[in-house]
Image (spheres, rainbow, N blue to C red):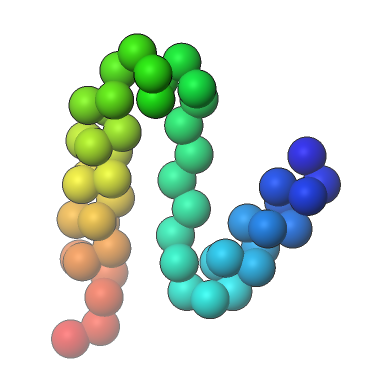
Amino acid sequence: MLRDHLRQTEIRALGWTVVRFTNDTALGEPWRIDDAIRDRARVLETCAPS
């Protein structure tokens, strides 16, 4: 858990966004991952400075 937290902190410090999914979702409902990433990208686009 601590290692995941540290890795996520480092990734965010680089300006990346972290979106997590369970293994069950990845294996059983991969379209939900696609939908979530597209939704998150739309949110980031609306927050980006012009």
Question: What is the residue that sits farthest to the front in this orientation?
Answer: 27
The part of the image, by quadrant, that contains residue 29 is top left
The residue at the point 19 percent across, 55 percent down is 42
Residue 14: percent from left, percent from top: 53, 76
Residue 17: percent from left, percent from top: 44, 60
The residue at the point 74 percent across, 58 percent down is 6
The part of the image, by quadrant, that contains residue 28 is top left
- Looking at the image, residue 12 sits to the left or right of residue 34; the answer is right
- Looking at the image, residue 16 sits to the left or right of residue 48; the answer is right
Q: Is residue 45 above or below residue 22?
A: below
Residue 9: percent from left, percent from top: 66, 63
Count of numbered labels shown in the rendering: 0
Q: Is residue 44 above or below residue 2?
A: below
- Looking at the image, residue 4 sits to the left or right of residue 35; the answer is right
The part of the image, by quadrant, that contains residue 16 is bottom left
Q: Nearer the viewer, residue 45 or 26?
A: 26
Residue 44: percent from left, percent from top: 28, 63
The residue at the point 21 percent across, 35 percent down is 35
Q: Nearer the viewer, residue 7 or 42?
A: 7
